[in-house]
Image: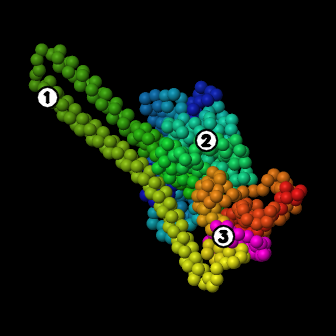
Amino acid sequence: MRLENEELHYRAKFDVYPYETQNPAFEKLCQILWDWVREKEWRRHSELFESLSTTSGKDTFISGNLTSSEGYDGGMGAEGTYLKTGSVASGAKRLWAMEYDEQDQRLWFRRWHTSVGLSLGEGGETRVNVRISHYAKPGYIGKPGFVPFASVPKFVGEMISLGSYQCCVGETVLERCETYLSTDDFGAAFVDNLTSGQRELPLILMCTDEKGATPVWDAEQFARKLAGMANVYVADWRSQELRKSLSSLFVRGEASFNYRCGPSTLRIYKPGIDLSDASSWRNSPFFPKAKIDEICGGDDSRPERFIEIITKSLGRAISNDENDVLEISDIERVKAQETAQKLNEQYQELKSRSAAAAAQLPGEDANILGLKAELDDWQSLATGYLTSYEDEHRRAEDLQKKCSELSNKMSSLSYRLQETSSRAERLQEENQLLAHSTSAISSLDHIPTCLVDELRLAGELWPSRIAILPEAYASAKNYPVDIDEAWQILSAMAGALWGLHFAEESADISEEFYLRTKFKHALTESGFTKTNGELMRLRRRVYRGREIDISPHVKGKSGPRDETFRIYYCPDAETRLLVIGHAGAHLPTSRTSRL
């Protein structure tokens, strides 16, 4: 029974298949749920714990005949704990449901509602349907209070890890941990699943940065918190072969390129993806590390905030099929259908027997005619009830379909709202940038004649994109640079390069930057230079009390030989700025040191 003010906390739906056994998982899944409820009630030292701990209590729970409080039929409770299980056999299927309504351990006005449905199919598979929500008691007026971040229920983790069985959503096997891709299994593990038209499970791909760090704080923890809702894959950007595999899947110049996942980026691929459709890539949202850090809260970082967004978005997309069981009311509905069907069969049998008996009589007297008229009346009444029930059942199915469509529409609108908000933020930033630029140009009293002047002007024109450190001004002093080239590079950094780092998704920043500006770019130094501690110390700076690495650099063409113009910078994710730490002569490398 859905509650008007309940908020979704966790949602999952998957099938458990016998894999190394012939026995269905149905009984084991009921056992897991019994253990879970019993453990929770043990912490409360409740009477329900004592009742569940008995042999008869366990049997009653698993058989679907348990009711902890008289009159409770699922849905909202009042005080204390409410538990009810129900079951019914429908043809070759066995259906079972549990509703568990409990008090929040911290807030008196909040309650938690857990609904679980199990459906044993003809092939031995068991469908598991889970929804956990929370709600405030009717009549409560006040702040909602702190809501725990979304997490995977303990019993779901145990179900997915159940030995000798395999959990699937559609044709995709559920994974409880992240999968690190390699060139050997890239096609079978990821590509085949991604492009399958039968896929029903969302896939999440994360690409590491050049140092092997994932865009989220902990890939294993992230994957565990999404168990049952999505499979998580990790591609190590340091592997050249893996980058080639990604490039062959998301081909530059083709529609598939819009679905690419760049370094230090996370992307969600919903079911039904078509890599040849260039217009639907927005249905596969991506999150660069800078955006993830921003969602998590910056300095007051809480990684759970990002998980909360993902889990609720994925949960809203899960809807019930016509034959799914989730609540006690679904069990009651099936029972009513079974009863109506049996009554109809009995009626048809009586009707047939009555017709046969009447045919055997030589004539019909008044008594027979009266009984026949009465039977016709009962038939009319039964037909009316059956028709009424079927109409109500169709109406309920239509409402369920509309509810599912509205849920999907709400999810789509939520995503569009998020995109619109992000676009509004970008426009606001651009307006602020234009205002700063106008102010800087208005206060300009002479045209820059040296590199120091250009750096100062760039910092004033693009303060939301570029930061200039004192070391950069010092290195630029008296350096004989081509003023026009230096300004072209600074302008390209504030425009194209900043966008590639913080606003766009790029599979290869250096290549993309060169294609747009014709300036060469490198994200790091050569291997020999990186192993030289003295040379790498020259590429360290301090910014806002933090040590940063300014190895990334843009290459100029002017300047003395072996001291050609370079601008070294750090793409700082915390401030979303390109922090320039050196502008001038090429910093020493392993090659120039030998020379």
Distance from Cα at disc 3 to Cα at disc 2:
38 Å
On residue 248, the disc is 2
Instruction: Identify the residue under disc 3.
Output: 484
Give SS at disc 3.
helix
Q: Earlier in the sequence, mark 3 or mark 2?
A: 2
Tell me the colour scheme of the image: rainbow
Q: Are marks 3 and 2 in contact (CB under 8 Å)?
A: no
Q: Earlier in the sequence, mark 1 or mark 2?
A: 2
Residue 226 visible to the viewer: no
Mark 3 residue crowding within 10 angstroms, few (<14) / some (14–19) / many (20+): few
- Between residue 360 and residue 257, name the one nearer to us: 257
Q: Residue at x 42, y 48 (%)?
A: 404
On residue 370, the disc is 1
- Between residue 309 and residue 195, name the one nearer to us: 195
The quarter of the picture where the C terminus appears is: bottom right
Q: At which x and y percent is residue 414?
A: 47, 58
